[in-house]
Image (cartoon, helix red, strand yellow):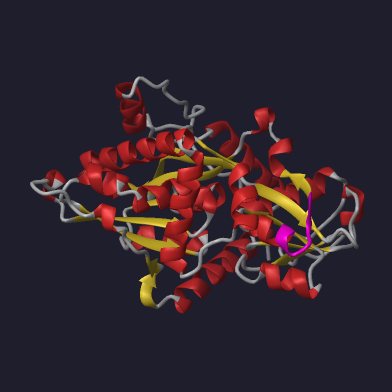
C-alpha cells in the first residue's frame, strides 16, 4: 500500500476517534461565553444572521480566540448575531465540523488546514487570517537526554500522526540524517503519537523520554522536571512560523462576507489588545481555559508558555508552504496544490481601516 494512501486511512481513523468521544455534544465541546459577551442593547443582526459558530482549541496558541471570547470582542463586532463556540482537541475533528457546517469559522494549525484543503480538492475552506507564531518546543528528560544527538534511540511524543508538530519533528529527524518510518514512528527515534492531555502523565511515568509539543503542554512537562532542549522557533527565519491560522467554510464566506469581516475585525482587535496588555491578556486567556475545561493553568506553566508565543494577524503564508513541503518530504502527503488556500481580502481591508500594513498570501491566494 502506498505511504500516502496509508496516511489518508490513518488520518480518517484519527479524525473519527475524537468524533466518537465527543458524540454527545457534536464535534467539539461547547465553550462558555463570558458575561461581557452579552449582546448590546439595540444591536442588530448582520445580514439577518442569527448566529455564527466559531471553533478553537483549548491551547494558549489559540489565545486570540480565547481572549476574543472572554473579553467579548467577537460579540461586540457581531452585534445581535450571536457568537457561539466549540472547543476541539484535534485538527481532524475541527475540519470535519467545518465540513459538516457544525462550525463556520475556526482557529486551527497549518497541517490540518493543508490536509483539509488538499483532501477536498480546494473546495472546503480558505485561510482568511493569521493568529499566532511559535509556542512549540522539544522538552526532554534531562536524566536521559543531555544533547540533541542523545535524541537518537529515545521515545519522543508528538500529538498526532501528521499533525503540525509531528511533521515538524519528522522533518527535524530527517535533517539529522536519521531514519524513521512516518507511519509507524519506528526507526532511529521512536515517535510516539500521544494526546496532549496525557503526555504529561506519560512523561512523568517514564514511558516517553520527551515530546515535541505546543504550549501549554511543553511548559507542563518542564513543571514535571523536563528541560527545553530545542525551541522550534530557532529553526525558522526571523524565528517566525505559523502555528495558528483562521479558516472559514467557503460557502459561509461567499454567503456572509460581512459576518466574516466582523469576526476578522474582532480578531485584529483581540491581537492588538493582547500585544498591548500581555499580563491582562494572559489572565483573560487562562480564565477562558478554566471556563472551558474546568481548570486554570498554574503560574509555573502559564508564564513560560505565554512568553514563547507571538500573536500576529499575518498568516505567515510562506512558512505554511514550507510546512507542506515538509509533510511531502516525510511521505505523509502528496504534493498538494495550495493555490487558492488563502483569501486575505477581508483581512487586508480590516488592516487598512486600522492603519496597519497589509499581509501577503505568498502567491497562494485566490484569483
Let me know if residue 349 appears in the view. Answer: yes
Residue depicted at 37% across the width and 64% down the height: 31
| Residues drawn in magenta | 222-228
Q: Using the image as rendered, state which of residue 54 and residue 287 is in the foreground.
A: 287
Residue depicted at 58% across the width and 62% down the height: 8
User: Horizontally, is 69 left or right of 148 in the view?
Assistant: left
Across and down, in percent, residue 280 comes to 46, 44
User: Horizontally, is 36 left or right of 335 in the view?
Assistant: left
User: Horizontally, is 220 left or right of 66 in the view?
Assistant: right
Residue depicted at 67% across the width and 56% down the height: 219
Across and down, in percent, residue 103 comes to 33, 58
| Outermost residue, left side | 42
* Residue 227 belongs to magenta span: yes
Quarter of the image that includes the N terminus: bottom right
Quarter of the image that includes the C terminus: top left
Q: Using the image as rendered, state which of residue 126 and residue 137 is in the foreground.
A: 137
Across and down, in percent, residue 318 comes to 57, 31
- Toward which corner of the image does residue 259 lie, by quadrant? top left
Against 276, is 248 above or below? Answer: below
Let me know if residue 333 appears in the view. Answer: no
* Residue 309 belongs to magenta span: no
Residue depicted at 91% across the width and 53% down the height: 146
| Count of numbered badges drawn on the protein | 0
Across and down, in percent, residue 353 comes to 29, 23
Amino acid at each position: 500500500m502506498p505511504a500516502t494512501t496509508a496516511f489518508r486511512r490513518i488520518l480518517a481513523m484519527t479524525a473519527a476517534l475524537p468524533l466518537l468521544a465527543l458524540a454527545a455534544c457534536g464535534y467539539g465541546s461547547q465553550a462558555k461565553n463570558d458575561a461581557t459577551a452579552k449582546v448590546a442593547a439595540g444591536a442588530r443582526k448582520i445580514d439577518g444572521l442569527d448566529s455564527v459558530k466559531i471553533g478553537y482549541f483549548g491551547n494558549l496558541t489559540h489565545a486570540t480566540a480565547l481572549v476574543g471570547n472572554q473579553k467579548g470582542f467577537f460579540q461586540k463586532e457581531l452585534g445581535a448575531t450571536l457568537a457561539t463556540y466549540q472547543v476541539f482537541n484535534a485538527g481532524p475533528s475541527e475540519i470535519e465540523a467545518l465540513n459538516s457546517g457544525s462550525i463556520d469559522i475556526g482557529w486551527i494549525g497549518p497541517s490540518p488546514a493543508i490536509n483539509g484543503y488538499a483532501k477536498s480538492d480546494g473546495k472546503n475552506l480558505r485561510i482568511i487570517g493569521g493568529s499566532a507564531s511559535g509556542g512549540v518546543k522539544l522538552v526532554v528528560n534531562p536524566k536521559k537526554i543531555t544533547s540533541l544527538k542523545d535524541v537518537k534511540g529515545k521515545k519522543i511524543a508528538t500529538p498526532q500522526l501528521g499533525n503540525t508538530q509531528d511533521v515538524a519533528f519528522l522533518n527535524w529527524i530527517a535533517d539529522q540524517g536519521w531514519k524513521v518510518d512516518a507511519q509507524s514512528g519506528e526507526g532511529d527515534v521512536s515517535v510516539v503519537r500521544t494526546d496532549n492531555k496525557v503526555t504529561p502523565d506519560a512523561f512523568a511515568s517514564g514511558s516517553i523520554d520527551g515530546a515535541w509539543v505546543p504550549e501549554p503542554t511543553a511548559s507542563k512537562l518542564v513543571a514535571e522536571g523536563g528541560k527545553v532542549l530545542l525551541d522550534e522557533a530557532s529553526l525558522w527565519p526571523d524565528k517566525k512560523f505559523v502555528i495558528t491560522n483562521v479558516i472559514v467554510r467557503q460557502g459561509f464566506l461567499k454567503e456572509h462576507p460581512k459576518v466574516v469581516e466582523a469576526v476578522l475585525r474582532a480578531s485584529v482587535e483581540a491581537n492588538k489588545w493582547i500585544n498591548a496588555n500581555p499580563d491582562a491578556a494572559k489572565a483573560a486567556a487562562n480564565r477562558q481555559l478554566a471556563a472551558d475545561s474546568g481548570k486554570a493553568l498554574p503560574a509555573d506553566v502559564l508564564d513560560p508558555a505565554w512568553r514563547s508565543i507571538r500573536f500576529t494577524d499575518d498568516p505567515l503564508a510562506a512558512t505554511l508552504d514550507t510546512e507542506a513541503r515538509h509533510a511531502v518530504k516525510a511521505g505523509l502527503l502528496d504534493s498538494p496544490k495550495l493555490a487558492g488556500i488563502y483569501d486575505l481580502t477581508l483581512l487586508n481591508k480590516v488592516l487598512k481601516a486600522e492603519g496597519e500594513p497589509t499581509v501577503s498570501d505568498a502567491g497562494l491566494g485566490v484569483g
